[in-house]
Image (spheres, grey):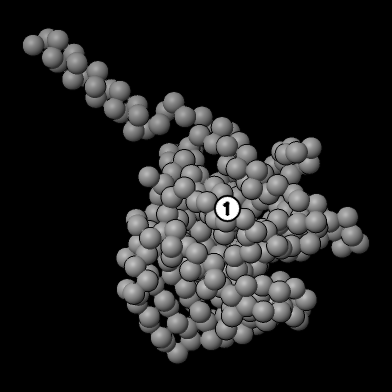
Amino acid sequence: MKNAVLLLLTSLILGSCKKNDTTLPTVSSLRVEGTMTVDALSRTYLLNLPPNYNQSSDVPLVIALHGGGGSATQMETNYYLTDKANQSQFAIVYPEGVRSDGILGARTWNAGTCCDYAVEKQIDDVKFISNLIDDLHKKYPRLSTKKIYATGMSNGAMMCYRLACELSNKIAAIAPVAGTMVTTSPCVASRSVPILHIHSKLDTKVPYTGGRSTLGFVVPPVMTGINTWLGIDACNTSVKAVNTLTKYTLTKWLDCNNSAIQIYLTEDGGHSWPGGDKVRAGADAISDAIVANDVIWSFFQQYKLP
C-alpha cells in the first residue's frame, strides 16, 4: 500500500511539473531582431513572441513573408499581423529577402521564376527558412514543432507555395495573398498541405487569371497552382462549395486528404492586403470585403503537422 501511495504521489508531482513547464527556459525579451548566416550571406529577421510566451508551451508560429521591395517592419506595420498574433497567442517571425545590389536595394524571394535579384543570384531561400525554423526551435523551445504556418504577400505569397512544395515536413498550412505559384521544378510535397488563397479580381500586378503583369513579367493563373495542389492533396474536385456574396466569392474544396483548399476572390481592392493599410501613396486600393488576418488565423488554427 505504501509503495502504491508513493508511486501515485510521484506521478502527481511529475505530472504537475510537466503541466507548469518549469523545465523550459524563460526569455527576457519578446522582440528580437535576429541575424543568421546561410550560404555565406547574412540573413535577417524580426521575431515577436506573444505576451504569454513564458507561461506557455507549444506556441504556434507564423512565418510572414513580405512582398518584393518590402521588409519585415513594412509588413508588420502595414498589415497589423503582430497585433493579430499577440491576440491569438501566436509567435510571428518576419524573415527578410536578400537586398539587391541596385540603387533601391529591394528585397525579393526566389520563389521560382520570380523575383529579380533573388532569382538571378539563385538565392536559396528555402534553405534560409528551413534553417530559421530549426534555429528558432533551439532558441525558443516553447515554440510548437507541429503548428508552423506561412503567409505572404505577392512575391512572399509565391514563396509560400514553394515552401509548401519543399518544406511540407515543417509547415502545417499556408495562406498566400495576391501571389501565384511560380515554381520551376515539379512540386514534390511529402504530405497534403492545407491552402487558403486570397486574391482580388482587380489585381493587375499579379492577375488572378494570369498573363502579363503591369510590372512587366508574366505569371501563370492562380488556378494552375491550385490545380496542382488539388492533386497533391487528393481532393475530390467534383465536390466543392461556392459561396458568392456581394463583395467576394469563397470557393472551398473540403473533400481532401486530411486537408482543405480555399480561395477568397474579392470584387474590390487590388494588389493589396485586405484589412491592411496602403504600403505607399498611389498603391492599390485595400479590399474591405474581408479582413485577411481574421480568415488566415481561423484557417491556421484548424491544422497541425501529423
Q: Position of residue 38 (x, y in %)?
A: 72, 39
Q: Position of residue 35 (x, y in %)?
A: 72, 41
Q: Is residue 231 visible?
A: yes
- Which residue is at the front of the view, 19 or 58? 58
Residue 166 lies, with reference to residue 229, above or below; the image says above
Query: Residue 117: which quarter of the image?
Result: bottom right
Q: Quadrant of the C terminus?
A: top left
Q: Which residue is mark 1?
A: 163
Outermost front residue: 186
Residue 21 lies, with reference to residue 303, above or below; the image says above
Query: Residue 36: which quarter of the image?
Result: top right
Count the marks: how many? 1
Q: From the viewer's perspective, tell me whether residue 64 is left or right of residue 51.
A: right
Q: Secondary structure at mark 1?
A: helix
Q: Position of residue 125 (x, y in %)?
A: 68, 49
Q: Is residue 159 visible?
A: no
Residue 229 lies, with reference to residue 35, above or below; the image says below
- Determine the residue positioned at 62% across, 39% down: 131
- Which residue is at the front of the view, 221 or 23? 221
Crowding at mark 1 (Cα within 10 Å: few <14, some 14-19, many 20+): many
Q: From the viewer's perspective, tell me whether residue 234 is left or right of residue 82.
A: left
- Which residue is at the front of the view, 212 or 97? 212
Label 1 is placed on what type of residue?
A: Leu
Q: From the viewer's perspective, tell me whether residue 297 is left or right of residue 288.
A: left
Q: Position of residue 176 (x, y in %)?
A: 56, 65
- Determine the residue positioned at 29% across, 27% down: 15
Outermost right residue: 103
- Determine the residue positioned at 44% across, 44% down: 146
Q: Quadrant of the N terminus?
A: top left
